[in-house]
Amino acid sequence: MKYFIKTFGCQMNESDSERIAGFLERQGYKKSENMEMADLIVVVACSVRQTAIDRILGLKPKIRKLKAQNSKLKTILTGCVIKSDESKFKEFFDDVIDIKKFLGGKYLSIKPKCQSLLSAYLPIMTGCDNYCSYCVVPYTRGREIARSIDEIVKEFKELVKQGHKEIILLGQNVNSYKHGFAKLLKKLDGLSGNFRIKFLTNHPKDMSDELIDAIAECEKVEKEIHLPIQSGDDEILKKMNRRYTVRHYKDLVKRIRQKIPGVKISTDVIVGFPGETEKQFENTVKLFKKIKFDKAYINKYSSRAGTPASKLQDDISLGEKKRRWSILNEIVKKKA
């Protein structure tokens, strides 16, 4: 029996795919390099943006064709799926199932089948408690659940033993890891072996001086911090339910750069959020010019059903969103 996994979305979904692969191979499945040769197709979904959902819906003709050619073919959709989308997917997937039910409640404990010999993902938690108004993650992954430090250390050691040189700690908000993220970094940094530590992602409201100091002090922790701003305007940040201000963000970046010389700071930003005026967008432009991000993931807002922001009028045209995207992109390119 052969399996094929198609993954959409972020590093957390990539990590889930590795655990699904590990689970299936222990059930006797072997990996197929393409859909056509598979007996089981698993799609790991991302529901953060409508474009990701549209890409999954675009698989319908191919999956139906494959099922017509192979009556024994099974198809499963898992990952981040909101209830309002399930009926569309059940038209061509045999099962639309929560990953915790698919792999079991403690699925993060499943040994992964890592895709890369160089780097490896290590989720330290799942879920999110922040409820940003544009995001479906708390509704698809649930509230935050953290793994124990001992469990994380055990898996970390196994990954180092396997020869992985770069280990990426994952969480929707690693700063809120309930057992202490600074404590965890110091614990991992003290382990023997030839490796580097990275982590994703941070929330500005929860990044403490203790954590900044830990990053500065830990020799094996990369001096790279992904710090999503989402908007450079306080009113838009409030609509997004981000719970920090632009001043807070600027002060945070200043402290980080003072304590960690040479640090690289990247960010996420959304352009064209409902009601974003030209002046509010210009505030984001000013912030980008001041901060001089090393990298930025610039997203054009798309409404997601089931989120508070979906009740707002998506009143910025796609053409205007593209224009704003281009302006911010040019600023980042000049820094590079």
Image: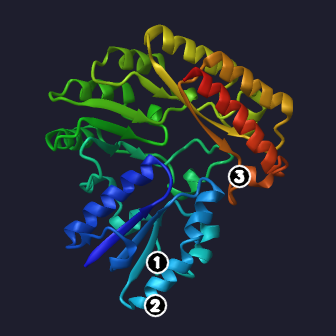
Residue 217 pos. (x, y %): 33, 14
Residue 121 in the figure: left or right of residue 293: left
| SS category of the residue bearing label 1 | strand
Residue at figure coordinates x 56%, y 17% from the top left: 253
Using residue 12 as the reference point, say whether residue 154 is left or right of it: left
The residue to which callout 1 is attached is 95
Q: Residue 321, can we see it? A: yes
Q: Which mark is residue 302?
A: 3
User: Image height check: is 209 above or below 72?
Assistant: above
Circle 3: element type: loop
Give the numbered dot on residue 68: 2
Residue located at (17% from left, 43% from top): 158
Q: Quadrant of the N terminus?
A: bottom left
Q: For the residue marked with disc 3, what is the amino acid?
A: Ser
Asked which secondary structure carries label 2, the reply is helix
Q: CA distance from mark 1 to mark 3?
A: 27 Å
Does residue 240 appear to the left or right of 336 in the view shown? right
Q: Residues within 10 Å of mark 1 (few under 14, many from 20)?
A: some
Residue displayed at 51% across by 78% down: 62
Dot placed on the residue nearer the N-terminal end, 2 or 1:
2
Q: Earlier in the sequence, mark 2 or mark 3?
A: 2
